[in-house]
Image (tube, rainbow, N blue to C red):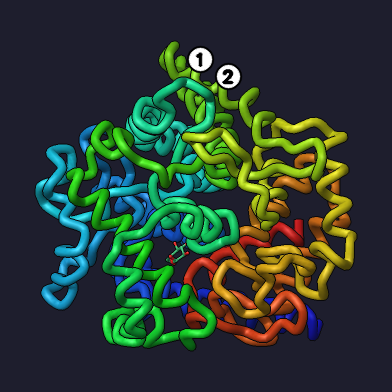
Amino acid sequence: MEEVNSQLKLKDRCQEVLDKNWQGSYTIPAEGIYPHQWLWDSCFVAIGLANYNIENARVELRSLLRGQWSNGMLPHMIFANHDRHNRDRKIWQSWRNPHSPDDLNTSGMTQPPVLAEAVIQIGRKLNICDRRSWYQDMYPALIAYHQWLYAERDPHQEGLVLLIHPWESGLDNSPPWINQTHMHGRPWWITLVEKTRLDQLVLLFRRDTHHVPPGQRLNNIDALVYYSVLQRLRRKNWDIDAILNRSHFVVEDLVFNSILIRANNHLKKIAKTIGHQLPDELRECIKRSEIALDKLWDGYYNQYFSRNFVTHKLIKEPSIATLLPLYSGVISKERAEGLVKMLHDKKVFDSKYPVASVPLDSKWYKELGYWQGPTWLNTNWLIIDGLRQYGFHREADNISKQSLNLVEQNGPYEYFSAKTGKPAGAKNFSWTAALTIDLQAKLKN
Ligand code: GLC
């Protein structure tokens, strides 16, 4: 009885957070620090909402489509329409690209394609008639998005899509991306700022470090490098041909590609349910992707890595990404078993509150460093789903239970120490609240 009560309390608490962050047709990730609509955040929120307010879940996803560009891209941010956010709009200047929407401003890049997953999770809660009309509703936008991903982001038809900025990966400063940041030349003015120690001034302009201790986030110099990459993309008017013409900072990201492969599978199911055939060309791309994941496998380290698009070299910096091919669902059982061993290894991912975003023995591991150590509910959700696909229910249950414990003890924070459970980042964070509700419901079934 006590347990049932505490589960109910947890659900209520999470619902309250989602209500508070609801803006009428979408949910912001957290007040103050994240005032706009983010692509994968909204998808995770919709997955949570689908458990108790299916209509709002549908509204949440439909509102994402407002931002879709005419070439099919789904931008990673849609800016809130308020004067106080003019600065954000000016930083991005999406209007420079003729494909961007006329009536609102967005970012010029995308984020992991979790949309098909969210559409399916909602569909599962509907009766067959409503499911069909829901899928029919979302299908054209999904097709356009996946076609865009292959057309623009897989120019050599390798089966792996490329990313042009770390923010597209959703795991902004995880080790593979920081590694790439440090490998490439940076503008002279950043070196000048570093030498003259003026980088402290950058704090005046950063929103994240107003809300979260600076030590937990990207250092000022790396933050400037990220900003300079954005500036360069903006100068190219967010045009992919111009961007790729002389680009060095381009990565075939493991998390993104694993999610895309799974999303393609969802897309096939959606098409089948409504009696459609995926366009032939897209079917070819999908086939190529499933095989291409193998190119990211390293037989010496026995794990997957992201790859530099230009040099084709694997970026051998271990991170939580290595577990995401479980979620793709296309790796062999034998490979899956190898990955699961890492979850049982105290030096790697076996901590009290799994799954650390970077292995515990990594030189990058920082207990509360952004994407460099803490546990996040969204990556846990994806890994849990992957584990279940391969029949590792014991491991999936353990990660689910410990994730719920974290939120029960601390509230829905943005991330938590994988060792002690200490909460950090933004409080009242939407996807933590939403995925808690979903994990709780799935654990009961
Ligand atoms: C940060 C995260 C990203 C998330 C965004 C809004 O940029 O790295 O994954 O979508 O915040 O929550």
> Camera-side residue: 218 or 355?
218
Q: Residues within 10 Å of mark 2 (few under 14, many from 20)?
A: few
Gap between marks 2 and 1 measured at Cα: 5 Å
Q: Residue at x 42, y 51 (%)?
A: 168
Q: Where in the figure is residue 364, as x and y percent of width and height? A: 66, 68
* 363 horizontally vs 172: left or right: right
Q: Where in the figure is residue 412, as x and y percent of width and height? A: 57, 78
CB-based contact (under 8 Å), mark 2 and mark 1? yes
* Three-letter amino acid code of the residue under disc 2: Lys
Q: Residues within 10 Å of mark 1 (few under 14, many from 20)?
A: few
Instruction: Determine the quadrant in which ligand 1 lies.
Output: bottom left
Label 2, secondary structure: give it: helix
Q: Is residue 444 above or below residue 99?
A: below
> Camera-side residue: 437 or 43?
43
Q: Is residue 50 visible?
A: no
Q: Where in the figure is residue 173, as x and y percent of width and height? A: 51, 63
Corner quadrant of residue 220: bottom left
Q: Where in the figure is residue 225, as x and y percent of width and height? A: 37, 63
Q: Is residue 230 visible?
A: yes
Q: Name the residue tied to disc 1.
A: 284
Where is the C terminus found, in terms of image quarters? bottom right
* 352 horizontally vs 164: left or right: right
Q: Residue at x 48, y 81 (%)?
A: 426
Q: Is residue 356 above or below residue 54?
A: below
- How many numbered circles are shown? 2
* Three-letter amino acid code of the residue under disc 1: Glu
Label number found at residue 287:
2
Q: Residue at x 35, y 87 (%)?
A: 200
* 167 horizontally vs 183: left or right: left
Q: Residue at x 68, y 64 (%)?
A: 358
